[in-house]
Amino acid sequence: MSHIEIYQSVLKKLSTLPIEDLEQVDSFLNQLSHERPMEEENKSLDLKSKEEIETNRKATLEFAGAWSDFSDEDFESYLKHTKETGNELFNREIDL
């Protein structure tokens, strides 16, 4: 589960709790935060986010130069076809 998914899951569950129970949850969270220093927590988040960034960067770079073997004519034809297809798919005019 990603960080965002975990936060969303926790927030969703918290939103269903009655107000009376939130005080207990707050106390519990305070205990957890005192047991684990914030610096350690932030360090692990930073490392994971750096790893995710690096993974995303590598995946993006795999596409670099993907069109380098296209001739100018082929690339222009590709762009034209892509734009036309996009316009057809997302045409806001509806024929009833």
Image (cartoon, rainbow, N blue to C red):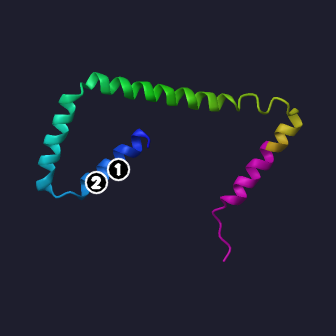
Spatial CA span between label 1 and label 2:
6 Å
Q: Is residue 29 magenta?
A: no
The structure residue drawn at horizontal position 69% and vertical position 30%, both measured from the top left corner, is 62
Disc 1 is placed on an element classified as helix
In-image side of 45 versus 79 (left or right): left
Magenta range: 79-96
The structure residue drawn at horizontal position 41% and vertical position 45%, both measured from the top left corner, is 5
Structural crowding at the residue carrying mark 2, measured as other residues with C-alpha within 10 Å and reported as few (<14), some (14–19) or many (≥20): few
Instruction: Check the image and report above or below for 36 versus 6.
Output: above
* Quadrant of res 59: top right
Disc 2 is placed on an element classified as helix
Q: Main secondary structure of the magenta part?
A: helix
The structure residue drawn at horizontal position 40% and vertical position 39%, both measured from the top left corner, is 3
Q: Position of residue 19 (x, y in %)?
A: 14, 55
The structure residue drawn at horizontal position 69% and vertical position 59%, both measured from the top left corner, is 89
Structural crowding at the residue carrying mark 1, measured as other residues with C-alpha within 10 Å and reported as few (<14), some (14–19) or many (≥20): few
Q: Is residue 84 magenta?
A: yes
* Residue at the disc numbered 2: 13
Determine whether label 1 and label 2 are within 8 Å by CB.
yes
